[in-house]
Image (tube, helix red, strand yellow):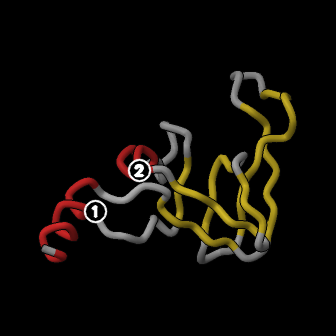
């Protein structure tokens, strides 16, 4: 897996932008320079995030979301397990 997170990612398993491997690594989102932990979906190229709107849910039980626009930065919180081993071998 590459060291850059996907351009568009969603935590909803029914979404076409859902990526289990990326989510297991942990994706951090910085929106307008502020760390966000409540992001449901994001698109870096289009410059928006979707965040839950309180505890409100739709008729299917999914959280209602609102789309916020602005600069979006995404990064992996955890390194790939195989990359750490390669880095240790190069240092020795």
Residue shown at 55%/43% (left/top)? 11
Residue shown at 58%/58% (left/top)? 28
Which is more toward the observer, 21 or 33? 33
Q: Are marks 1 and 2 in contact (CB under 8 Å)?
A: yes
Which is more toward the observer, 23 or 33? 33
Which element type, helix, strand or loop, lies under badge 1? Answer: loop
- According to the picture, the residue beneath numbered tag 1 turns out to be 1
Which element type, helix, strand or loop, lies under badge 2? Answer: helix
Residue 31 in the image, given as x and y percentages of width and height: 74, 67
Residue shown at 82%/50% (left/top)? 66
- Quarter holding residue 35: bottom right
Vertical placement of residue 8 versus 59, above or below: below
Residue shown at 19%/67% (left/top)? 88
The mark found on residue 25 in the picture is 2
Residue 51 in the image, given as x and y percentages of width and height: 76, 48
Vertical placement of residue 24 versus 78, above or below: above
In the rendered image, the quadrant that contains the C terminus is bottom left
Disc count in the image? 2
Q: Earlier in the sequence, mark 1 or mark 2?
A: 1
- Mark 2 is surrounded, within 10 Å at the Cα level, by few (under 14), some (14 to 19) or many (20 or more) other residues, namely some
Vertical placement of residue 31 versus 58, above or below: below
In the rendered image, the quadrant that contains the N terminus is bottom left
Residue 7 in the image, given as x and y percentages of width and height: 51, 69
């Amino acid at each position: 897996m590459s060291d850059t997170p996907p351009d568009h990612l969603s935590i909803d398993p029914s979404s076409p932008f859902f990526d289990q491997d990326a989510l297991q690594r942990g994706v951090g989102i910085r929106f307008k320079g502020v760390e966000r932990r409540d992001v449901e979906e994001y698109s870096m190229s289009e410059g928006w995030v979707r965040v839950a709107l309180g505890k409100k849910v739709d008729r299917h039980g999914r959280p209602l979301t609102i789309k916020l626009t602005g600069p979006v930065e995404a990064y992996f919180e955890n390194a790939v397990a195989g990359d750490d081993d390669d880095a240790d071998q190069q240092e020795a």
